[in-house]
Image: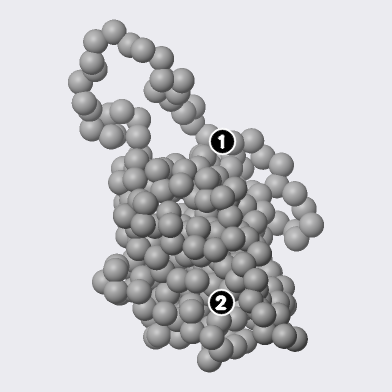
Amino acid sequence: MIKRFFSSLRHLQHENPLGLPRSGTPPELPRRLRGLPEKRKIRDVRKVIAVSSAKGGVGKSTIAVNLALAFSRKGHRTGILDTDIFGPSVPTLLNLSGEPRLSSNNQLVPLTNYGVKAMSMGFLVHEQAPVVWRGLMVMKALQQLLHEVDWGGLDVLVLDLPPGTGDTQLTITQQITLDGAIIVSTPQDIALKDAVKGIAMFRKVDVPILGMVQNMSVFTCPQCNHSTHIFGSEGVVRECSKHGIDFLGDVPLHASICDDADRGKPTVVAEPTSSRGEVFVAMANAVGAKIGL
C-alpha cells in the first residue's frame, strides 16, 4: 500500500519564488500555461470545507472531527480528510485503525466510524513510525489523498488542515474547489497572530472564510462553578469584528472534551445533548446554511 506514494515525480517549475523584480510586465497566461494546477472538485463530493488554525495546539482537529460528526447527525453523508502528513490526529479521534483496502479502480476506500468516512496518512503508516519525507514526496502523498480516495458519494467533506500557511495549504487551495474555510483559534494573542495570517492566506487565494471558532474560551471549575478565562476572553470575537468575519461559536475548555477525544469518542458522540455538544451542532447549522448544505 505505501508503495503507492513512491511513484516517480516530474520536475516542478517554480516561478520567481523570492519575488525578485523583473523587467516589464509579463502577459497574463492561463493557469495551465503558467504551470499552475487547475482547480477541480473532489469526485463524488458536493461540498468541501477546510478547517484551519495556522497555529498548532489550539484544538483544530478536535473541532474538525466534531463538526463532521455534527453534520452526520443532521443526516448528511459526511467524510473527513486528515491532510496532516506528519502528525495525523483523525485516527485517534475517531478510534480508527487498519490499512484501507483498494477499490476496484485502485482507489483507497475510507474507514468509517460513527457514520463518518475518514481517510488519513495515519492509516497508511505505523502509529509510531515518523514520516521522514522531503517536500516533493509529501506533496505527492497529499495529491493522492485528495484525488485517489473513493468517497462513494458525500454531501460534505471536512478537510483537517495542518498548522501553518505553507505547501500543504497552498496545494489544497490551488488544486481543490473549496466552498469555504473555518479558522480555529484560542483567545490569546499569540494564537491570534497566526490566525490572522491564516485569514490573509485564504483571502489571497480567493477562498471564502465561513467564520472563526473560539476554542478553550473559558474554564468553569466543577467544584465551585467559578469561571476563569485562562487564555483571555473575546480575542476571536475582536478579530472577527476587525476583519469582517462571522463568529461561529465559543467552545469551552472542559476536561470531558479532551477525555472524549483521547478515547476516540468525541463530544458529539459521547455527550450530544450537553452544552458542549450543542455548540458543535449549532456550528454545523451555521456552516451548512452558508454553503447551501
- Farthest top residue? 23
At horizontal 36% and vertical 70% (from top left) the residue drawn is: 287
The C terminus is located in which quarter? bottom left
Q: Amino acid at mark 1?
A: Leu
At horizontal 59% and vertical 88% (from top left) the residue drawn is: 271
Rate crowding at label 1 as few (under 14), some (14 to 19) or many (20 or more) other CA atoms within 10 Å.
Answer: some
Badge 2 is on which residue?
112
Q: 17 and 141: which one is in front? A: 17
Relative to 38, 126 lies left or right: right
- Farthest left residue? 27
- Residue 107 sits above or below residue 2 on the image: below
- Farthest bottom residue? 273
Q: 38 and 1: which one is in front? A: 38
Which mark is drawn over residue 136?
A: 1
**Label 1, label 2: how many angstroms apart (C-alpha)?**
29 Å
Q: Quadrant of residue 216?
A: bottom right
Q: Position of residue 51 (x, y in %)?
A: 47, 60
